[in-house]
Amino acid sequence: MSTNFGAAAQDYAQHRQGFPEPMWDRMPALGIRLAGASCVDVGTGTGALARGLAQRGARVVGLEPDVRMLKRARDLDRDSGLHVKYCAGSAESIPLSDASVDVVTAAQCWHWFDPDAAALEFARVARPGGSVLVAHFDWLPVPDSLALATEKLILKYNPSWQLSGGDGFHTSSLAHLRRAGFSKFETQSFEIDARYSPEAWRGRIRSSIGIAALEAAAVKCFDDEHKQLLNSEFPGENLAVLHRVFLLVGNLP
């Protein structure tokens, strides 16, 4: 499947919510200390997680292969008054020195990596005693929900989309990270309602790969039908969409 998110970079920057505050509250209990820490956020996209790290006192490098996403990330940083150093690059070839960072993060992106190559790179750039954090913030297509109705519509336009029906639990990285040398893994997850206006939910879905991978004309047709779906079946200006936050943390001895 195409990973061409850059075509939807504006929607991605405007409508993808950052991780909710309760996630950050759990970091100390997971052994993640951010104040003064050096971090690399791999697959940073428009920098949502990277800005959260910087906001909490970390020195952050955001790594992303699509320069269109990096442009949006820099725009958002300027608007927020935060500083992240962004550079183009991939999880499989991180342009940092050995043992140079305290925390390596990957949010919403592990499934796009070559997992063994990425895990080895994460272990290479992490300092002894450093941490890895793999984080997800996924809508949950529970019965009778807006998310489920939206997923059905995505599949109408993109039957090859493979990410429908998820439960928000993501452990596929663990085996690869363990082989690369990380250990003492912990996981946490919780469910939370994310609030969207109808326009914001439409933008959130346009920036998901099920729609972002389509041609522009198909995206427009989908968005028109999605708007009709919201108006007819999910009216209102404050839409609650159930999400799961899932965190996997490991340490490098």
Image (spheres, helix red, strand yellow):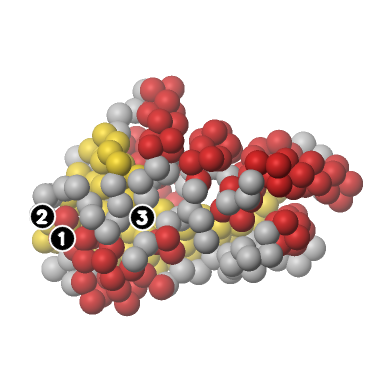
Residue at the farthest right position:
232
Q: Tag 1, which secondary structure?
A: helix
Foreground residue among 142 and 34: 142
Amino acid type, label 3: Ala
Q: Mark 1 and mark 2 in contact? Answer it, CB < 8 Å.
A: yes
Say how many tags the image has. 3
| On screen, residue 203 above or below 169 | above
The picture places residue 93, in percent across and down from the top left corner, at 23, 55
Q: Tag 2, which secondary structure?
A: loop
Q: Can residue 161 be seen in this view?
A: yes
Spatial distance from mark 1 to mark 2, Cα to Cα? 5 Å
The residue under the point 35% across, 41% down is: 50
Marks 1 and 2, the one that precedes in the sequence: 2
The picture places residue 148, in percent across and down from the top left corner, at 73, 61
Within-10-Å neighbours for mark 1: few <14, some 14–19, many 20+: many
The picture places residue 119, in percent across and down from the top left corner, at 26, 66
Within-10-Å neighbours for mark 3: few <14, some 14–19, many 20+: many
Q: Mark 1 points at which residue?
A: 124
Q: Mark 2 points at which residue?
A: 98
Q: Name the residue under label 3.
A: 106
| On screen, residue 98 above or below 60 | below
Amino acid type, label 2: Asp
| On screen, residue 48 above or below 3 | above
Using the image, tell me which numbered label, if any, was put on residue 54: none
In the picture, measured across the screen, residue 71 lies left or right of residue 4, that is left
In the picture, measured across the screen, residue 135 lies left or right of residue 249, that is right
